[in-house]
Amino acid sequence: MDQAEELLERSVVNYQGRPVGTLAAVDPDSPPLNYSQCFMRDFVPSALYFLMRARPEIVRNFLDATLELQAQERLEDANMAAPGLMPASFKVVPDGDGERLVGDFGEDAIGRVAPVDSCLWWVLLLAFYGRVTGDWDLAHQDRYQTGLRYILELYLEERFEMFPTVLTPDGSFMIDRRMGVAGHPLEIQALFCAALKAAPALIAPGSACERYRGALERKLELLLGYIHECYWLDLPQLNRIYRFRSEQYGACVANRFNVQPGAVPSWVSEWLPREGGYLVGNVGPGHVDFRFFAQGNFLAVLSGLIGETERAGLMQLVEQRWDDLVGSMPCKICYPALEGQAWHIVTGADQKNLPWSYHNGGNWPVLLWSMTAACLESGRRDLAERAVEVAERRLVQDRWPEYYDGPTGRLIGREARLHQTWSIAGYLLARELLDRPQDLKWFNAL
Ligand code: GLC
């Protein structure tokens, strides 16, 4: 604990003399690339931990800084980030006698990936800040209402969409490389659900955001029904899909996406326990991505995207498939890995995403916090404790790696950064939740 606290402190970055976020990694051995920046998603476990430890000022400064960076109305340059978009990361650079912030919206990032999750995390952090401190005045300030309005517009405006889910490009969230996660990936839908629930409390009475209240409510209702119907997979549902008829036309058909039964991968039927289930990774025309994505499933519990019965089913699956999903380090980012021809085609032969490495089936310690919170929220303290124990066996001696490799995560990730901040903060947050489960109330509606 002491070492983790000290390392977290060392990662804090200052702007104009005030703490404003945490660096992604402070690894003495590897080239920094963009790990010397503060990432929106990486800061989340640090932020939640700071808030719970009565240090709200750093979170407030972070919210201010990122609001300052938010993309504004496009002028003549149509290639700029859409108005309202929040950066994936930012850095502090010297500027004359002072310093300034520079955001990265994906234009410098490897693969030029767009951070669709950033705005959603920002809304959630703002709401979290309000709930913990009771200070809703921050969110209700005019400039925050303007920022929020941009975001609501960006996420609620109808485009080429037929479903209540958010349509996103590949690699637009924690998995920020080509991994066949374009379309309607679960993690974004879980964050979207949480943001839809969190937003109403952030709207100042009489502000221009008021007109979105109705849309927020309607979208949430549609989203909950749709995810339940189309993403939840258990044995009865798998049997229905397996016996689907295809080429059905019309509004009320069972196989609305024209999923071909032959496309069901052979591992699923053996892997899915008799009792229990999970939310699949993605759904779209002719497509169900049956892979298990941990962050999306755990955030679905925390956001209330799934109800009590499904939560219990998810916990049963985690328990029964413990070796696959937890193994030597909580927790596998997605299961199973893409191998052979599928790896070649879907990742574009990505050497960093080799089977059972990095995003393609690696184990990520940061997932410990959402796993712990989801287990506690589902009344499975036993699983949360077990996961924290597994993590404790290795994290300190391995120097807090970013990720682990191998089918059960026994190897330190080949290109993993050490002293990765969200691995450290994720552990501290998980411990904090075990010690003070009453703090889970802050997650309400997350
Ligand atoms: C990697 C991860 C991404 C993370 C970033 C900084 O690119 O895939 O999720 O935000 O590193 O740690």
Image (cartoon, rainbow, N blue to C red):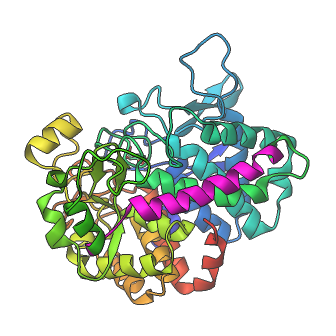
Q: Residue at x 16, y 43 (%)?
A: 343
Total marks in image:
0
Where residue 186 sits: x, y (%)? 42, 55
Q: Residue at x 44, y 46 (%)?
A: 173
Residue 402: quarter of image: bottom left
Q: Residue furthest bottom?
A: 382
In the image, residue 119 lies in the stretch drawn in magenta? no
Where residue 189 sits: x, y (%)? 49, 53
Image quadrant in which the C terminus is located: bottom right
Q: Is residue 141 left or right of residue 165?
A: right
Predominant secondary structure, magenta span: helix
Q: Residue furthest left?
A: 340
Could you say which is closer to the camera, residue 177 or residue 430?
177
> Does residue 162 appear anywhere in the picture?
yes
Residue 101: quarter of image: top right
Region of the chain picked out in magenta, as a range: 210-235
Q: Residue at x 50, y 46 (%)?
A: 163
